[in-house]
Amino acid sequence: MTSNESLVLDYLGRLEAAARNLPADRRAELIEEISAHIAEARAQSASLAGPDADLIDLLARLGDPAEIVRAASDSPALEFAAAASSPDARTAGAARAASIVPPGPALSDGPAAYLPPPPPGAGPGALEITAVILSVGSVVFLVIPGIRVLAPVGWLIGVVLLWYSQRWNTADKVLGTIVWPAGLGLAVLLSALHGTRPHLHAGGPFAVVVLAVLGCSVAAAVIVAVRLLRRAGQHPAFA
Amino acid sequence: MRCMVDGEAGNLVAQMRRGVLPYCVLAMLGGQERYGFELVRSLASVDGMVTGEGTIYPLLARLRRQGLVDTTWRESDAGPPRRYYRITEAGRVALTEFAGSWTLLRESVDALLGSAAPNSKKGRRTDDL
């Protein structure tokens, strides 16, 4: 029995030494709990043969005192448990959890930023491709003399499809809607200011500026079209 | 650096276990109050949940400080007095909260791990256009 006592005392001594950096109340509580655990185990196995072996096994199962104290000092679970119980952080936690599921564009423009994920195995659908070609791409119609008149109609249909689709968030939809009128509008505005019309064969340095603006808006349209198509094809696995 | 992948995965699993352990404890207290030794032994009997039984006590102390569990000392018929742990209302809220997040996370991870399988990827490509 004496050797048993010394085994326990030795163990608790090592625990106390390991716990010397803990706040006093936490150290006392920890030692109290571990002592109670040992006492309980010994009370329950008093009738068993080989108490020495039992005790050694008991202490081995409790683990290295240093490890117990480490568990008392580092607390990765602490923040999460605390977060779960405070209402503010709970919302943040829910948002974190929600962002696991959808492709999650990190835009804070309201609920539309979190889109329902596209059905598994979907790239950009026919609807999305048509929407992009018409809304963003119909600027190209403008430079083809025969179908120039179709450009506004195509744009309008494209924009309707763009907003109808579930694949984009509001920011993407606004971008797809304005890229074409914005570039064109700027060119027209510049021309109006100069009292000329944005004709391809109009001479003079100002026409060059207008053409440059038109060129830039075509480039912007291409970039937006690529972005929209990529977004529409985004799947959680690739996001 | 060479053994990084193995080490990191193992370390991650250990961290995940440590992260979910508080909620496993709360779940074990969901149905009934238990005293420390009983709780620790039941938890340790679940495969892979606990490495050292002693490390549960700091966790219990933390849950108590956070108000997620309550404790009372009570005499036992045989042996020393026992400290009984009981889940609080805040503990139940935290547990319910976690159970929801856990289900969501588990399903999402399962779905992603599943879609990483080679044959499901083939299925995706055919649907593209």
Image: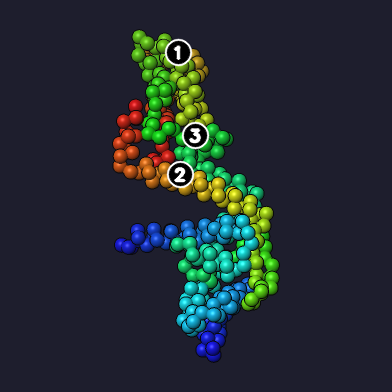
Quadrant of the rendering where the N terminus of chain A is positioned: bottom right
Q: Quadrant of residue B26?
A: bottom right
Whether A50 is drawn above or below A237: the answer is below
Share a chain, discs 2 and 3? Answer: no
Q: Label 1: which residue? A: A153
Percent across and percent down for residue B35 are: 62, 67
Spatial separation of the CA atoms under disc 1 and disc 3: 30 Å
Amino acid on which the number 3 mark rests in the picture = Pro
Percent across and percent down for residue B53 are: 51, 70
Quadrant of the rendering where the C terminus of chain A is positioned: top left
Percent across and percent down for residue A142 are: 39, 15
Spatial separation of the CA atoms under disc 1 and disc 2: 42 Å
The answer to which of A112 and A26 lies nearer the viewer is: A26
Q: Quadrant of residue B2?
A: bottom left
Percent across and percent down for residue A155 are: 45, 17
Amino acid on which the number 1 mark rests in the picture = Val
Q: Chain of mark 1?
A: A
Marking on residue B108: 2
Spatial separation of the CA atoms under disc 2 and disc 3: 13 Å
Q: Residue at x 37, y 11 (%)?
A: A147
Q: Label 3: which residue? A: A116
Q: Pointer 2: residues within 10 angstroms few (<14), some, or many (20+)?
A: some
Seen in the image, is A160 located left or right of residue A207? right
Q: Residue at x 49, y 65 (%)?
A: B45
